[in-house]
Image (spheres, rainbow, N blue to C red):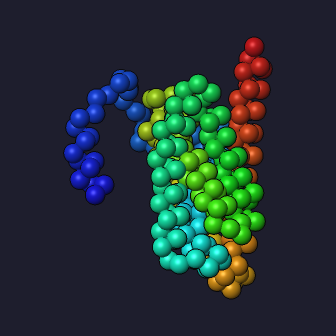
Amino acid sequence: MTLVAGCAFSPLMARRVAVQRRDRIIDFTAMSNMRFLLLFCASVLSSGGYFLPYYFQPPYAVVALGKDGAWGADISSILNAGSIAGRILIGLAADYIGPLNSLLASLVFSAIAVLAMWLPCNSVGLLIASALLYGFVSGSLISLLPVVAANLFGIKRLPSILGLLYISYAIGAVISSPVGGKLLDDYGHGTDFTWLIVYAGLFFVLSAVLLLALRMWLSFSIVHRV
């Protein structure tokens, strides 16, 4: 489906900004840049937590709350519906408050949806609220990263920078659901989601801390130049 959609619509896209020819495909010099390292580590952590609610909130409705299997499908639909709206509206908000600030806010609300709402959840209503909030803010964790990278490093370096940043998604995927599932099986005995939820929430908290450090680093650099 992705291949068909990509082949169908890519020819219709027009380049808005002229990009100069790159000197190298992947710019490994970025690895020595503190701004890149903070963004890369924050991306590893945010992608590590990203899939956990999508994978485990639906079975939570069935296993922990005792609802029938249809509720699992309903929670999955709510998560994805919220993501559609969030990617659009948070993207628009980023035009006004900045993509880095929007990404930081999304991480904070992701942590709230997981730790303050999903962790103590004992009712379907609270689970729906958690799924709706998380679905709304989680989409921007993926969609805003290229925009933040473009603002920090410029259009010319963006392709090679994104090539490195997307490696963080692979690392995050490895430490995400497989570890979460292991926590659920070994410490939750398949029914207690507590450690899994804490694990997911810590990803967002730590990622937000790193992005806040990046935000402060940028502010300090501006003040120092002035």
Q: Look at the picture and state if 191 lies above or below 225.
A: below
x 68%, y 86%: residue: 189
Left/right placement of residue 189 relative to residue 83 reads right
Residue 177 position within the rendered picture, expressed as x and y whole percent measured from the top left: 57, 69
x 60%, y 29%: residue: 98
x 68%, y 68%: residue: 123
Q: Look at the picture and state if 98 lies above or below 125.
A: above
x 59%, y 47%: residue: 137
Residue 168 position within the rendered picture, expressed as x and y whole percent measured from the top left: 56, 54
- Between 168 and 97, the one lying in front of the other is 97
Placement of the N terminus among the 4 image quadrants: bottom left
For the question of whether residue 27 can be seen, the reply is no
- Between 49 and 63, the one lying in front of the other is 63
Left/right placement of residue 53 relative to residue 23 reads right
Q: Look at the picture and state if 87 lies above or below 48.
A: above
Residue 73 position within the rendered picture, expressed as x and y whole percent measured from the top left: 47, 68
Q: Look at the picture and state if 141 lies above or below 184.
A: above
For the question of whether residue 15 can be seen, the reply is yes
